[in-house]
Structure formats: C-alpha cells, structure tokens
Amino acid sequence: MSNGSTRLTLLELNLLVKETLAKSLAGSYWVVGEISEITEHPSGHCYMELVQKGDDTDTIRAKARANIWGYTYRMLKPYFESTTNRPLSRGMKILVNAQVVFHEYYGYSLTVLDIEPEYTLGDIELKRREVIARLISDGVMNMNKELELDMLPQRVAVISSANAAGFQDFVKQLTHNPHGYAFTYELFPALMQGDEAELSIINALGKIYDKLACFDLVTIVRGGGAQTDLSCFDSYALASNIAQFPIPVITGIGHDRDVTVADMVSHTSLKTPTAVAEFLIDKFRDAEAVANNLAGSVSQLAGKLLADMKESLTSNQVELQAILNQKVAQNKLYLQQLTSSLPHMAKLVQVLHADELKSLNIRLSIPISRIKANYVKLNAYAGLLKSMPHKLLQNEKIKIEHHFSTLKNLHPDSILHRGFTITYSNGKIVKNLNNLNVNDVITTQFWNGSIESNITKIKASKKLLANNKK
C-alpha cells in the first residue's frame, strides 16, 4: 500500500462514485441512442439497453442501461406511438431526456424522463426513404406491378396468421360471395407483427415459390392489429422479395393512413383483407360481363344474317316472277300476231294464184293443222311457265326454312337444351383431352347454369388409344 492512499470497501467506493456523480452530473441530459434490447415488465416498467454504433459499421462504441419507470412509461408510450405510428422497438434510434444514476448495487444507468418522438419519426422516414431509393437503384421497384394478373385469378396463396381476424374475414368474403364464384386458397402461416415478422413473411414467400405453378397470385393480409405494428412492412429485405416475386402480390394489411414500402412495391395495394377479396370477386364479375356481351353479339349477328338472307331471297323471287311474266306475254303476243296473219295471207295467195288454189288449199291444210297443234303446245308451255316460278320459289322457300331450322338447332342454347354441355378451361372451349391436366379446374356449362370441377383423373377412349398406337 502506497503512502497517503486510503483503503475503501467496494460499497464505500460505489457510494463515493454515486455521490460524486450526483454532484457533478445533476439535472438531466438529452441523449441519442439506439435501442438494442427492450422489455416491458408486468409491473409497468420498461427496461432498455441503449447503444451507439460506429458511423459506417455495426461496431458498438458505447452502451448503457436505461429505465422508464411505470408512472412515466404509461404517459410516454401512447404519446410516442400515436406520433410515430411505431412502438418502441429494437434497432430504433431515440432521443431521450434522462438523469444519470449510479446505484451501489446495480451500477450505472439512465432514468428516462421524456422522449422526443419527432427525432425518431425523422430517423424512421430517413430509413424509409433510403429503402425506397435502394429499391429504385436496384431496378426492382415496379417489377411486380408490371406482371399481368390473370383475367380469372382463382388459385390464391395467402400469407397471414391463421388466427388473424383479417384472414377469417378474407376467407368468408371470398368463399361466400353472392355470385357463387369458385376460388381455391392455401394458407402459408406467418407472423404479421413483431421483430420476427419480416423473416417469417419472407420464408412464407419461399414456400409459395416452391409451389409456384399451383397459384395465380399471392395475397398478404392482416387485420385487427395496431397501427404501430407495421414497421416490418417497411424493411428492404421484405420489399425486395415482394417486388421480385414472379407472380402478382396483393397486399391488404389493414391500415388507413400510411402506405408501407411493401404496399408500394406490390402489384396492387388495398386497405383491408375484405377489400382484397372484393377485388378478386370483381375480376370474375368483369370477365362474366365480357362473356355475356360476346354471347349477345353472336346471337345478334346470327339473327341479322338470317334476316338479310331472307330479304335477299324475297327480292330475287319478285324479280324472277316479273321476268317470267314478261317473257310469257311477249311469246303469246307473237303467236297471236302470227295466227291472225295467216287467213289474210291465204286470201292474197288465192287472188294471185287462182289456178293453184285447190292444190294450195290441199297443201295448206297440213301446215294449218300443224300450226294449231303447235298453238296448243304453246298454250301448254305458257301455263307451264306460269306455274314453274311458283314451284321454284316454293322449293327455295322450303330450303330456306330448312337452313333456318338447321341454324336454330345448331345454336349453343338449343344444343344445351338437348342435354349436351360445353366445357371451358381458362375461359376457352375444351376440344381435346390433350389440352387438360390433372388438378386443372374446368367449367361445365349447362342450359340453366354452370359448375366448377377439379380434374382428378384423365382417361382417353380405347379407340383413341388404338389410333395412337398405330
């Protein structure tokens, strides 16, 4: 022991330090630190560990315990969360007003008296902007938005908590829609808040990726949680995974005010899980309207075509009848003129050739009889010409009525009423088994409605198999 030194017990030394700090560091100080650990005690107290890291590294340069006693924490917590829309959590930078405390048993710590939420809000917004800038720099910000969503998005992969009220609302709205549209969904459970939510949702996306061919889109739904539980949806890792996912991702994470980074990079962002379900139902309703319009157009076009054909045939009938009537009248007039001129010609010949009259009468008797016979034939032909157009037009009318009946019987509605059905797959008529696969969803159209079916087995006809072998 050196001369002049005083021997102290550890307690005496700690009390001396406590007294010295109380004198030299009286009052409170505004201190900036990052929360590395935080625990809310059942008693109402909040215990934290604050650290300071290097500017460009995660190396911890300083560390201190900080306590917010229950009576103070009950006022600071709601004020901080209502201002920042975030809870106090690990990795968050805060500006606190604290007293320096040294306890002879527990050692050095800070007692927090106040928190400045505006500082944290600025830091959160700064990090959020950095995440957005990084996504833009990576060229992935709009990748998911550029994907084409199926006209009938029927197979849905859902990321949510199984017990979340938002998930239950989504399923009820989707499966009990008033239009009877058939959807299939599979839940990929994930934590939707807290420190582990980010990794949990990313892992769920990975599981969906392994079954990508089974789904048309992904929905991330969450409801019933606090507005302050959305911090995980502003992370770069989660936003990057959503942006680069190969099928459309739709978010409905149950918030009214803020737009998270996850919302910004998703294909479609909606406010609530119920809104997501309504969005999908509306897609089916739009497709149904298009199909109905097309069916109406086909029916209208067929009717117009038949009407035009009927009008054309009627016009041709009238024109043909007029032509035939004209020809018959011309031939009849010619025959009448020829017949009336024969007696006059005979008298003239009799005067000019009196000596040859007898022989001429004999010779003319044969041609006159022939002319009369031909006149009878011509009258018969004239009658035949009058009746032929009517018969021809009657035959054409029968043909037209036969064609019209055939077209009517070939109309899809007539075929369906006779017991036949039409099968669709992805909105297209199925004509060949080779276009179908097991687990495909097909739509069977009857005359009075349709049904949705899932293919479990495909069996070709024996005749088709034999032809294939040849």
Image (cartoon, rainbow, N blue to C red):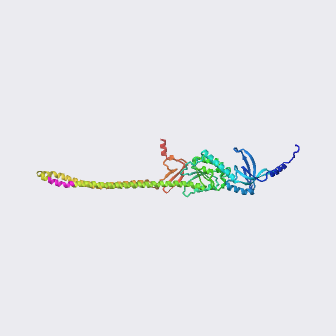
- Which residue sits furthest right? 3
Q: Residue furthest bottom?
A: 178
Residue 372 visible to an observer of this rendering: no
Residue 431: % across, % down? 48, 48
Residue found 71% across the figure and 54% down from its top? 116
In the picture, the quarter occupied by the N terminus is top right
* Residue 281 image point, x, y percent: 56, 55
Residue 255 percent location from the top left of the image: 63, 55
Magenta stretch: includes residue 338: yes
Which of 57 and 107 lies nearest the eye of the viewer?
57
Count how many numbered circles sit on residues in the image: 0
Q: Magenta: predominant secondary structure element?
A: helix
Residue at the top extreme?
A: 470
Tell me the magenta residue range.
337-348
Looking at the image, which residue is at 69% across and 54% down?
117
Determine whether, in the image, residue 461 is placed left or right of residue 131: left
Q: Position of residue 429 (x, y in %)?
A: 49, 50
Q: Is residue 373 left or right of residue 4?
A: left
Q: Is residue 109 left or right of residue 238?
A: right
Pick the residue in front: 380 or 312. 312
Any part of residue 341 in sight: yes
Q: Residue furthest left?
A: 355
Height in image: 469 above or below 449?
A: above
Is 326 contained in the magenta span? no
